[in-house]
Image (cartoon, grey):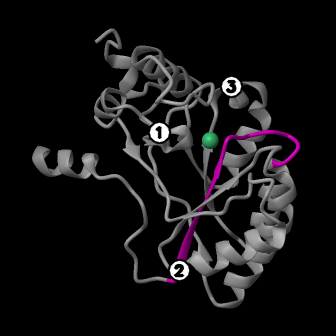
Amino acid sequence: MPSLLYKIYKSNDLWRVDTLENDIYLTFDDGPIPEVTPWVLDLLDTYNAKATFFCVGDNVQKHPAIFDDLLQRGHSVGNHTFNHLNGWKSNPKDYILNVKKCSKSFPSSLFRPPYGKTSYSERKFLKKYFQFVYWTVVSGDFDKTLSPEKCLEKTISSTEKGAIVVFHDSLKAKENLQYVLPAFLAHFSNLGFQFKAIPYHHQGAKHPLEQIKTAS
Ligand SMILES: [Zn+2]
């Protein structure tokens, strides 16, 4: 690929997938954790559904078996920092080091900033190394003021082909997720939709971030 095109490609953030197929791109943030992630994995399997998990490095280190299971089942993974940092409240150098630490526990070319927040300098730097992935639909599964029924209705009505939908495999989201995810999968599966993972690559054992100095 010519380098200019490559740069343009790299600078494009992903908000939805441009597709003619009836495909939906489910994403799960903040895991993996034993209380929720294995349940999600089993449920996805029953629909032959693939998804993308934006993992927190600290959780991957604490629960390596769940993380391996997730990879074995053919899902994609993306970097979500090591400690779920808010980029607006972090020192840029600390933020980048935290992303790098996550990258050391598992390499991925995909990055989703927690809360969708990065400062100008953090973003400018990280965009050189990652495909940023945002979302088309936020389920609000973590929102305690949102009833499971409302959460389901809202998520279904805003989803269409190519949508990137955010769920969370977290304790905060567990209650809504356990109601919404089975119904969401059943609904779109009945309509003939398939659930796909966002393609990613892991640059061998070494992530490109390994090869650069983060002291800038
Ligand atoms: Zn998050």
Frontmost residue, 79 versus 144: 144
Q: Residue at x 35, y 14 (%)?
A: 214
Which residue is most to the bottom? 191
Where's residue 37, x and y in %? Answer: 79, 48
Kindly identify which residue carries mark 1.
117
Disc on res. 130? none
Q: CA distance from mark 1 to mark 3?
A: 19 Å
Q: Amino acid at mark 1?
A: Lys
Give the image quarter of residue 176.
bottom right
Q: Residues within 10 Å of mark 2 (few under 14, many from 20)?
A: some
Q: Nearer the viewer, mark 1 or mark 2?
A: 1
The amino acid type of the residue labelled 3 equals Asp
N-term-proximal mark, 3 vs 2: 3
Quadrant field for ligand 1? top right
Which span of residues is magenta-colored?
A: 22-36
Q: Percent position (x, y) of residue 62?
A: 77, 25
In front: 56, or 207? 56
Dot 1 surroundings within 10 Å: few (below 14), some, or many (20 or more)? some
Is residue 154 a member of the stretch shown in magenta? no
Please indicate whether residue 49 sits to the left or right of residue 6 in the image: right
Please give the label number shown on residue 58. Answer: 3
> Which of the marked residues, 1 or 3, is nearer the chain's N terminus?
3
Circle 3/circle 2 CB separation < 8 Å: no
Residue at 46% in and 56% down: 199
Horizontally, is 116 left or right of 68 in the view? left
- The quarter in which the C terminus is drawn is top left
Q: Is residue 203 above or below residue 196?
A: above
Q: Which mark is residue 160?
A: 2
